Amino acid sequence: MPQSRIAGVGHYVPKNVVSNNDLLQYMDTSDEWIQERSGIKERRYADRTGETTATMGVEAATIAIERAGITPQDIDFIIFATLSPDYYFPGCGVLLQRAMKMKEVGALDVRNQCSGFIYAISIADQFIKTGMYKNILVVGSEKHSFGLDFSTRGRNISVIFGDGAGAVVLQPTEKAGQGILSSHLHSDGESAEILAMYNPGTHANHWVKEKVADFGDAELGEMFMSHEMIDNAQNFPFMDGPVVFKKAIVKFPEVVMEALKANGLETKDINLLIPHQANLRISQFVQHKLHLRDDQVFNNIDKYGNTTAASIPIALSEAWEQGKIKEGDLVCLAAFGSGFTWGSALLRW
Ligand SMILES: CC(C)(COP(=O)(O)OP(=O)(O)OC[C@H]1O[C@@H](n2cnc3c(N)ncnc32)[C@H](O)[C@@H]1OP(=O)(O)O)[C@@H](O)C(=O)NCCC(=O)NCCS
């Protein structure tokens, strides 16, 4: 059975750099608070109307496809991970298929937030292993800047997130021990509302005691998105940061160890751990817990903030460009986020 290897990787971030101090014009915060709690110095925001989640995905995909030595017409399956799609439906995969003039190949959107990219490459891996597809494009892209609460009310979330996209092309390899060695996916829906954007949605306050959507007396139609929801700022994401933090620092190390154990490897064997860039403090905690050296862990959250589904492919692409990943290296990808969902993938480059 063939294994899947990453044949090309690319990333794209918008030109517009937004520093912590730039955010002071919208909300009561400080560079010191943001850096101390998250390690973030700046992030990128997409052009307001000129760039979308899908167009940034196209930019990253173009680089990944070129580096894989193929053309967009060679792609035989698309997987697009995002929580900030251009449309509620259809997904971004078909917009990318159209923009890149690809053949009428399958396009799947993955909605697993911060662990979206891990889920996406895990799916791609299965299709490659069965021999069904030979060139799978996996994209992670986010345009968070369009949907955050930039008032002081939303500052615990809005200072953390940034825009950008990353992509990889997966191809089969017969070389023993090369490529994706294993992937490990998990979920625990008990805390689904801890980090979530409830509206627009069809929940009608079904799942929680406290109302998360106001829609007056409406019975039909106006319940999906009402004026009340907008007046009460219920159209923005919600996050209980400390709860997310506490769960993340347990699940990240656990899922890295699960990947290593499944392959008879140890933490000292890791050449590069690329954690989802959620918060520098989380990554530092994970590094400490796993006794990893600084050179074994890749961080770039200081420049881009948390780009959710895009964070791992952006980091992977940067690490590769910086020569930090060489043939034969053991690379571990790990993510945790909304759902909660989490996962890891272990790769021999
Ligand atoms: C979000 C996070 C940085 C907040 O840090 P924290 O130390 O937990 O902060 P809290 O939410 O407890 O808030 C502490 C105080 O800072 C304030 N605060 C929140 N955001 C602020 C901001 N941007 N600027 C200044 N003050 C802020 C709060 O209002 C609160 O004030 P109070 O004590 O007067 O009520 C942190 O919880 C975190 O990173 N969690 C994980 C989130 C994450 O990774 N999410 C992505 C999912 S993968």
Image: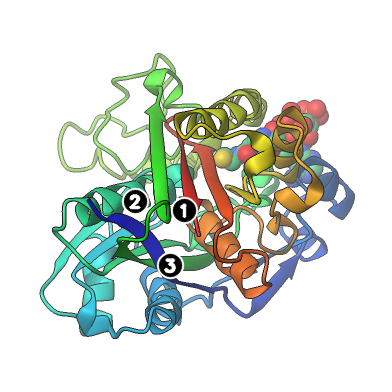
Q: Give the crowd class for mark 1: few <14, some 14-19, many >=20 residues within 10 Å.
A: many
Residue drawn at x 13%, y 58% is: 132
Whichever of labels 2 and 1 marks the residue nearer the N terminus, that label is 2
* Cβ–Cβ under 8 Å for marks 2 and 3: no
Residue drawn at x 10%, y 74% is: 104
- Label 3 CB sits under 8 Å from any ligand 1 atom: no
Residue drawn at x 23%, y 42% is: 222
> Residue 246: horizontal and vertical position, in percent?
65, 23
| Mark drawn on residue 120 | 2
Whichever of labels 1 and 3 marks the residue nearer the N terminus, that label is 3
| Mark drawn on residue 167 | 3
> Residue 88: horizontal and vertical position, in percent?
27, 55
Whichever of labels 2 and 3 marks the residue nearer the N terminus, that label is 2
Q: CA distance from mark 2 to mark 3?
A: 11 Å
Amino acid type indicated by mark 2: Ala
Q: Which residue is mark 1?
A: 309
| Mark drawn on residue 172 | none
Label 2 residue SS: helix
Q: In the figure, 103 relative to 250: above or below?
A: below
Residue at the left extreme? 104
Which of 157 and 80 lies nearest the eye of the viewer?
Answer: 80
Amino acid type indicated by mark 1: Ala
Q: Quadrant of residue 286?
A: top right
* Cβ–Cβ under 8 Å for marks 2 and 1: yes
